[in-house]
């Protein structure tokens, strides 16, 4: 129970009003340590409740009055969507406490954000890129910052925010600052640098190592022939599968936009989310999905992290993810908070090796599935039995190998000798040489005739 933690009564009332009854595993393990003020690095899967794991101890600390007037807590996240969701959850849990939170992300008016800093909200929720712009212009004041949270830290590295994170952390000079780092994995090389430079004697908490996550998600694969086959198969799958909301992942923005139009043409309620649409369009797409106005969202990997929408029970990988980590974060949009989910991956001949590498990385085997009436001509790679010269090479005995090695050496000696000038003969032998070749012609020597 949350009441077992040393949390302020105002927070317990907010939890009760929000319907939070039992802490998740990551919350049960993180909150007691975070309340002591320790620096922590936590590895936990998406959808495990880690937002509450850092918000509750953070808010509890800020309820203690402080003479400092600057921002007291900063939460850094990789994407606008995730920042917006964490900001909303922060305001929900801070109900009745008087604590204010500000949201700073790209796509919003810069002057408005600068005025927000002047109001000194206790908490700033932000993405690194936009916040660095404010740091450079001198609109921020983090000298009194008591808590720094780096959420989805590995994703921030993947998006190229490593230097931005270090630059922002350098602005947070409060001597008693607490840093909480959350990541799906703690093994990235760049992450180790951040841990060494930003955290002080951190304690590690591992909740479900990344490769062991998502045991409640059923993972299937369907073989396909080409792009046209994929498009028709997706329509068939979405028309026949039972789901509340579905996410469809593609590799490129152009493919996502095209696929959304194709699904709408086939009378499916679809929307799109990728990096080229405006913030207003992003917010509208997410709102339509949450409200059920659309039930299929086509997205690039931009949405693989940060989307927290209730009812997503189907994920379709229209294109196989480039890496095992990306695959994990894609399917992590379903099966959240212990619910069951389904992830279906389309695999063409060109994507077979990618799929196989993901299976090896996660130490799993995708369930093979076929859609009636949509069987592909491609049946997977063929195993070719070695024959002829290849087979004979495989069956060579050690003695044969030795003889082959000696033969190779002889050929090498012959090759080295090629083109070398022969020694010029002298004397009579030189006189008898052929003018054309320089060698003495072949002659038959007759036996001398003797008389008795």
Image (cartoon, grey):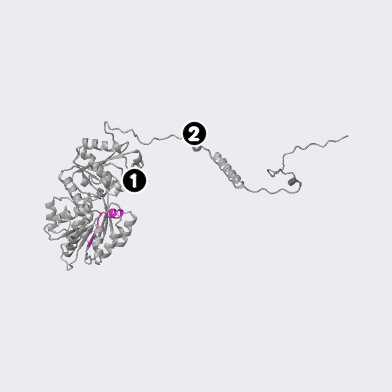
Q: Secondary structure at mark 1?
A: helix
Q: Position of residue 428 (x, y in %)?
A: 76, 46
Q: Which residue is mark 2?
A: 388
Count every numbered label the image shows and give the total: 2
Span colored in magenta: 147-158
Q: Position of residue 377 (x, y in %)?
A: 33, 33
- Check residue 148 for magenta coloring: yes
Residue with the mark numbered 1: 361
**Residue 299 against residue 4 in the figure, above or below:** above
Looking at the image, is 217 positioned above or below residue 134?
above
Residue 38 visible to the viewer: no
Q: CA distance from mark 2 to mark 1?
A: 35 Å
Residue nearer the viewer, 392 or 112: 112
| Extreme residue in the front direction | 435
Circles 2 and 1: CB atoms closer than 8 Å = no
Q: Earlier in the sequence, mark 2 or mark 1?
A: 1
Left or right, residue 406 beside residue 287: right
Residue at position x 23%, y 52% in the image? 26
Q: Secondary structure at mark 2?
A: helix
Name the residue located 23 percent from the left edge and 39 percent from the top edge.
262
User: Where 428 sits versus 132, above or below?
Assistant: above
Q: Nearer the viewer, mark 2 or mark 1?
A: 2
């Amino acid at each position: 129970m949350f009441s077992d933690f040393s949390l302020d009564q105002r927070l317990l009332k907010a939890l009760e009003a929000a319907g939070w009854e039992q802490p998740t595993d990551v919350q049960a393990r993180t909150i007691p340590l975070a309340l002591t003020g320790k620096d922590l690095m936590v590895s936990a899967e998406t959808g495990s409740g880690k937002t509450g794991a850092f918000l509750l101890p953070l808010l509890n600390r800020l309820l203690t009055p402080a003479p400092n007037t600057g921002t007291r807590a900063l939460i850094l996240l990789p994407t606008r969507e995730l920042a917006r969701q964490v900001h909303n959850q922060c305001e929900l849990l801070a109900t009745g406490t008087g604590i204010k939170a500000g949201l700073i992300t790209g796509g919003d008016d810069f002057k408005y954000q600068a005025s927000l800093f002047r109001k000194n909200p206790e908490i700033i929720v932000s993405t690194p890129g936009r916040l660095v712009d404010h740091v450079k212009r001198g609109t921020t004041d983090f000298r009194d910052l008591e808590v720094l949270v780096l959420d989805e830290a590995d994703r921030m590295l993947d998006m190229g925010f490593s230097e931005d994170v270090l630059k922002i952390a350098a602005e947070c000079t409060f001597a008693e600052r607490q840093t909480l780092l959350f990541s799906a994995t703690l093994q990235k090389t760049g992450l180790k640098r951040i841990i060494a430079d930003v955290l002080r004697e951190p304690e590690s908490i591992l909740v479900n190592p990344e490769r062991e996550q998502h045991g409640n998600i059923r993972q299937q694969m369907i073989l396909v022939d080409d792009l046209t086959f994929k498009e028709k198969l997706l329509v068939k799958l979405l028309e026949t599968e039972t789901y509340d909301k579905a996410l469809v992942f593609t590799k490129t923005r152009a493919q996502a936009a095209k696929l959304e139009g194709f699904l709408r043409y086939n009378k499916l309620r679809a929307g799109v989310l990728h990096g080229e649409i405006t913030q207003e369009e992003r917010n509208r797409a997410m709102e339509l999905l949450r409200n059920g106005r659309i039930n299929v969202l086509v997205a690039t990997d931009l949405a693989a992290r940060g989307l927290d929408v209730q009812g997503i029970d189907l994920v379709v990988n229209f294109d196989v993810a480039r890496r095992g980590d990306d695959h994990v974060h894609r399917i992590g949009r379903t099966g959240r908070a212990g619910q069951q989910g389904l992830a279906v991956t389309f695999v063409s001949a060109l994507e077979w090796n990618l799929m196989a590498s993901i299976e090896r990385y996660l130490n799993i085997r995708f369930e093979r599935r076929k859609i009636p009436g949509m069987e592909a001509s491609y049946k997977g790679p063929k195993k070719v039995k070695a024959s002829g010269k290849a087979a004979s090479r495989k069956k060579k005995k050690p003695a044969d190998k030795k003889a082959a090695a000696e033969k190779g050496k002889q050929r090498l000696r012959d090759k080295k000798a090629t083109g070398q000038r022969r020694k010029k003969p002298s004397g009579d032998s030189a006189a008898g040489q052929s003018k054309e070749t320089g060698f003495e012609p072949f002659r038959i020597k007759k036996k001398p005739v003797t008389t008795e």
